[in-house]
Amino acid sequence: MKLLALDTSSIACSVALQIGDEVTTRHEEQPREHTRLLLPMINGLLDEAGITPSDLDSIVLGNGPGSFVGMRIAASVAQGLAFASALKIVPVSSMAAVAARVLAGDDVDEVVVTQDAHMQQVYLGIYAPGNDGLPVERVPERLHDLVAIDELAPRSEATRFAAGYGWQRYPELLVANRDRIATVSEVLYPHARDLLPLATVALGDGQAVDPQDIVPTYLRQKVAEKPAPIS
């Protein structure tokens, strides 16, 4: 299996190439540099492996939620590569990738991922480990205010980690949930390598789509939509 994964939903510009069991990556955390970094990262990985996009089996896209501009950049590049090489795209939650990184390193019952949604809100996802150790969504991803998270039982005996940049961006959110969170992880942003095992499962479930059918996960639709024309 040859898969190329990319994610630019956060300040991280991240690319990973899987050929069989071998994974190589490029990952840089630089705000507003995705358009400069992404294509050279992709070309570098493909050149090192001695393959072209047409040799791939699928493109894996970190599909948000996250930065509107960032998601559009990755989606556009993924679509361009997929159209040119007659490939399908496997959309994967960028926040699930953060949870996957936490679960890979720690014995955790739940991972609560938040990313900065601006406007004094976060994108929220809550995940538990599945039988294969990969994250399973416990509640649908959503926008959340800087208040206690009702789905998290206070003073629970569950080992619950907070991950993602949202906790750092809004420390008051952590204060509001201090009796619900055991540990704050150092994992802040999605890494493309963590999209790959999730994509493998998604491929097996038939979740690959044609490039024209990709819809980035815009949880704040009113910002994502084009303004109506003035009459």
Image (tube, helix red, strand yellow):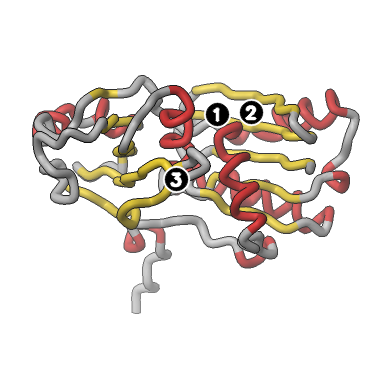
Which quadrant would the N terminus be assigned to in this image? top right
Q: Is residue 163 left or right of residue 144?
A: right
Q: CA distance from mark 3 to mark 1?
A: 35 Å
Do the residues under discs 1 and 2 have CB atoms within 8 angstroms? yes
Q: Nearer the viewer, residue 22 or 88?
A: 22
User: Quick check: marks 2 and 3 in contact, CB under 8 Å?
Assistant: no
Residue for badge 1: 33
Q: Which mark is residue 37?
A: 2
Within 10 angstroms of label 3, few (less than 14), some, or many (20 or more) residues? few
Quarter containing the C terminus: bottom left
Image point (28%, 31%), residue name: 162
Q: Is residue 110 above or below residue 200?
A: above
Q: Amino acid at mark 2?
A: Leu
| Kind of residue at disc 1 | Glu
Which residue position holds label 3? Answer: 130
Instruction: Give the residue at the far right of this rendering.
Output: 50
- Name the image quarter holding residue 95: top left
Q: Is residue 38 left or right of residue 120?
A: right
For the point 58% across and 34% down, the residue is 192
Residue sitting nearer the eye, 112 or 210:
112
